Structure formats: C-alpha cells, structure tokens
Image: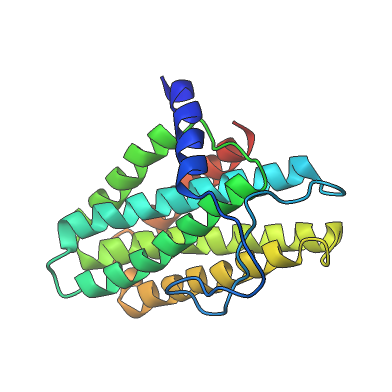
Amino acid sequence: MAAAVVPALRCSLLQRWPYRCGPGVRAVPGAGAALRPCSSRVAQDGINQPVIDRIIRVDHAGEYGANRIYAGQMAVLGRSSVGPVIQQMWNQEKNHLKKFNELMVAYRVRPTVLLPFWNVAGFVLGAGSALLGKKGAMACTVAVEESISEHYNNQIRTLIEEDPEKYKELLQVIKQFRDEEQEHHDIGLEHDAEATPAYSVLKTAIQLGCKAAIFLSERI
C-alpha cells in the first residue's frame, strides 16, 4: 500500500510546484536569509545524483515527519500557554517542507515510500509527548531537533567534500534550516525540557527512532 502512494505523491508535487524561475532572489516566507528559488529542473551535468537523491529524500521525509510531530503537539497543547511557541516552530517547519518539495521536483528525486508511516508515527510521537505535559512536548522537540541538526551538519560536510561551489545553493538551504532547527532545540531547553520525568530515557529513545528513520528514508 505504501508503494502505491509514491507515484500519486510525486504527481502531486509536480502539479503543485511547476516553477519556472527568472532572475532574482526570493525570500522563503518565515525564514531568515533570502534563498534563490529552484528552477523546475536542475542541470544534471556533474551532479553526484546518488548523493543528492539520498540527501533530498531523507530531508524531505524529516521535515514531513517534523510537521506531523508539531501537528500532534498542537492537537493536545494548542490552547495552552505554550501553544503559540509550538505554532511558531511549526510554521518554520512548514516552510522547510515547502522548500524540500520544490527541491524534489528540481532534482528529480522520488519521495521515500515510508511517508504514510511517518505521517502516523510523527503525529503519534507529537501527541504522545504532549500528553506528558508542556515539558514532555519540549523534551521531544529537543531530542528531535538535536538529531536533525547533527544530521544536517553531516550533510554539509558531505557536500563541501563533494564540491562547495557546485552545491552552493543546496548548502545555503541546509545551513539555514540547520540553524533554525538549532533554535527550536534551544527553545525546548528554555521551556524546561530537561525537567521532564525520565528525560534522559525519553530523549535517548526518541533519538534512536530518529536515527532509524534517517537510515531507512535515505534508502527506500
């Protein structure tokens, strides 16, 4: 069933983001630095396609999962005092996902077949952590965002080793999103994430899940 979702999703992406970009620079809404828009197709000459496929596929899956986590948290805590904080972080994640949707089209990358699973798993993790209270939700945020920031740093090193000039625009995107994920991590700490009961156990468990999700989404 999961495999059947992929062609439909890819078709949807192609219909939703048929960009034809002219000169100039466009700012990503809600993001920091201005990012140059992606053309609907990126010239493939000299591109290490297997590396780019893995990077964009897993990053799209990660941002998709992050959106579902925040959706789950908002379903439980949306009307609480921490609701606006969660919403602010979620808005940035929506912009991240939008950008990676564009990059998937531009680089001709298929999404992971596991998106239907991440859809459910992300929401359950977000809602489940929020049921532990505000601190539990923030503990989840710290664990996930720390994993994502580390993952983005690994990708930055990979692309620099490949060719920093050739992948300049992609590097700019990943660096900006890495910085924003780190901000979310810091916000979680500021909102008493570490005061969650069994914080270390919860954080370790979530990060093990993140590592498994990254490994699988890069490959299938």
Q: Residue at x 57, y 36 (%)?
A: 216
In which quadrant is the N terminus drawn? Answer: top left
The quadrant where residue 199 appears: bottom left
Q: Give percent across and percent down for residue 183.
A: 46, 76
Residue at the limit of the structure toward the left, as seen here: 79
Q: Residue at x 30, y 46 (%)?
A: 123
Depth order, front residue of 26/116: 26
Q: Residue at x 33, y 70 (%)?
A: 193
The quadrant where residue 159 appears: bottom right
Q: Give percent across and percent down for residue 57.
A: 59, 43
Q: Give percent across and percent down for residue 46.
A: 87, 49
Is 191 left or right of 145, judged from the image as shown? left
Depth order, front residue of 176/46: 46
In which quadrant is the C terminus drawn? Answer: top right
Looking at the picture, the colour scheme in use is rainbow
Tell me if residue 195 can be seen.
no
Asked if residue 68 is positioned above or below residue 167 in the image, the reply reads: above
Is 149 left or right of 126, judged from the image as shown? right
Asked if residue 162 is positioned above or below residue 14 in the image, the reply reads: below
The quadrant where residue 158 appears: bottom right
